[in-house]
Image: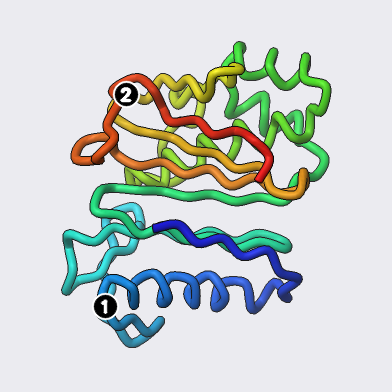
Amino acid sequence: MLMISIADIERKAQSNHAHALLRECLKRKGIVYEKGVSAVVKNQYGKPSLADYPEVHYNVSHAVGICACIVSDTECGIDCEKVRDYRPGVMKRAFSETEKALVENAPDRDLMFFRLWTLKESYIKAIGMGLSYPLKDACFDLTESGIVSAPEGYRFRQYVLKGRYVVSVCERSQGLVDDKASDNGGDAGEK
């Protein structure tokens, strides 16, 4: 289950808003969740999970003007960003040569940068390693037919909202009903 909220929320309140989305998603699965009260455990890299529901996977993300949450029966990650000026220094450290070329040749470099960045972030969050994973090793290409990725065994979706926000979702392919080994389910259209 995926929930996205576009709202002008103060930075300090964004985490609480993202957890309100999580609470709503979990409620629909019959799970009562309260931030700071429900038993949450973290892996060695800090990825949280519900101690009483190890079969339920979730991830939240928030940025200026947007919050997002995914709850799944398989490992998952989500990242959302407001499109702003891209950062060449980050691109140099985190992007493959192919990805750098995609950004440099894109009609909207800022949008392309954040489309690729959010895919990378959703993947490293899904595998539970966060920024300890070498981002250059998670390579993506965006084609007219969708998202092409190097990380095998994962399915990706992407949403560009109002032309200003990008949300990328990653789920482990194993166990998904519409599992397609190399079709990463890339919806890169305007929503």
Residue 172 picture quarter = top left
In percent of width and height, residue 79 lies at: 54, 49
In percent of width and height, residue 68 lies at: 54, 60
Residue labelled with disc 1? 31
Image quarter in which the N terminus is found = bottom left
Q: Is residue 172 above or below residue 21?
A: above
Residue labelled with disc 2? 152
Which residue does the image show at 21% across and 36% down from the upper left? 174
In percent of width and height, residue 164 lies at: 77, 47
Q: Amino acid at mark 1?
A: Ile
* Number of numbered discs: 2
Neighbourhood count class around disc 1 (C-alpha, 10 Å): few under 14, some 14–19, many 20 upward: some
| Mark 1 vs 2, N-terminal side | 1
Q: Is residue 178 above or below residue 45?
A: above
Neighbourhood count class around disc 2 (C-alpha, 10 Å): few under 14, some 14–19, many 20 upward: few
Q: Secondary structure at mark 1?
A: loop
Q: Secondary structure at mark 2?
A: loop
Residue 43 picture quarter = bottom left
Q: Is residue 64 above or below residue 154?
A: below
